[in-house]
Amino acid sequence: MRGKVILKPLGQGKEKIIIPNALREGVGDIEVRCVSPYKTLFQTLELCKAEEIPLAPHRLAGELLVNENGSRNDEVCDAIIAEYNISSFWCNIFTHNSPDTPIEKKIKRKYPNGEIRRILTKEDIIGEMNKIQVSKDGLIPGKHFGYRMTNGVLEFSFKSGDLNIHELPVKNGRYLNGEYPTNLLTGLPDPNGKGPKRKVWFWENTTAISAIVLWLDSIFYEKIDLNVYEDPRGVLEIKRAKIIEV
C-alpha cells in the first residue's frame, strides 16, 4: 500500500493538505510541518533545540521526496514548494575523513572563503578511513549532540554511538564521483550494489563536516549542496504520521 503525505498548513484555520498514494510501497504515511521558512544553520539548531525536534532526518526525507527509481517525487516536492514557499531545507549532519589521512580527534575542513567547519569526536566514533559517518535519524540538538559557535567556527560534538558508519566507493585512495546504487533506507551509496542509481559527490582531498541541504526544485540527489552555514534554508519537521486507531 502506498503511503500518503500530510502537510500541516501555514496560517490559522487552514485545512491540512493530504496527498494520497504519494509515497512508494511500504513507506507508510509521512507528516510535514514548516517550522520556519528560512534560517541559517546555527539559527536552525537553536530553533530545533527550543522545540525539541531533530533536524529533518535524511532517510525519511529521501522516502518523502524520492521515487522508487531515484527520481524526484514531483507531486510531493511541488506541493511543499507551493505551501511553504521554500526551495531547500536543512537536513542532518554529514561528516567523513578523506582517504589516506590519519585518524584524528578533530575532523575539519577549510573552505576557499576561509570558513572552517569542525566536529569534535571521541576516538571510538571517528571510525576508519574511507568510510562515511552520518548522524542517526532523530537526533535533537542540545539533547543528542552538542554544538557551539567559537570565533565564527561552528563545532559539533557527538557521543559514542551517535554516528552511523557506511562504506563508500573508493578507487586508488579517492572517493568516486558519479552514479552508484543507493540504499533506499539510508539514502547512501550501497556497498552491496543494491538500490536505484543516484548521482553522488564526495570530497577527494580533505576531511569535511557539514549539514546537508536538500533542494526541492531539482532532481533530489543531484543537488546536495554543502554550502556556507550563513545561507538561510527552510526548517522542516518531517516525521512518521501517527496511526489513530478507531
Image: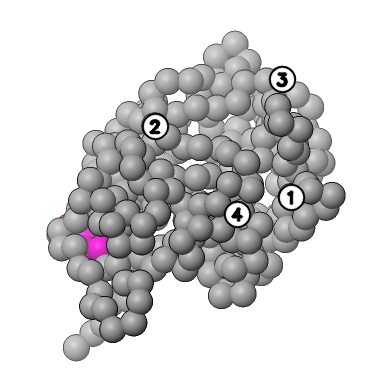
Tell me which residue sits at (56%, 58%) in the image: 39
Amino acid type of the residue that numbered disc 2 sits on in the rendered structure: Glu
For residue 221, say whether it is visible: yes
Mark closer to the chain start, 1 or 2: 1
- First in sequence, mark 4 or 2: give its number: 4
In magenta stretch: residue 214: no
Q: Considering depth in this image, is 188 or 142 the residue closer to the camera?
A: 142
Is label 3 in contact with label 2 (beta carbons under 8 Å)? no
Q: CA distance from mark 1 to mark 3?
A: 25 Å
The amino acid beneath tag 1 is Leu
Residue topped by disc 1: 154
State the residue in front, 244 or 46: 46
**Helix, strand or loop for the magenta stretch, by majority:** loop
Callout 1–callout 2 Cβ contact below 8 Å: no
Real-space CA distance between mark 4 and mark 2, rounded to the nearest whole angstrom = 22 Å
Q: Which residue is mark 3?
A: 100
Look at mark 4 in the image and give the residue it sits on. Answer: 40
Which of the two discs, 1 and 3, sits closer to the camera? 1
The alpha-carbon separation of the residues under discs 1 and 2 comes to: 26 Å
Mark 3 or 4, closer to the camera: 4
Circle 2 is placed at which residue position? Answer: 222
Distance CA(mark 1)–CA(mark 4):
12 Å
Q: Is the residue under label 2 in contact with that under label 4 (CB below 8 Å)?
A: no
Q: Amino acid at mark 3?
A: Asp
Query: Magenta stretch?
Result: 1-5
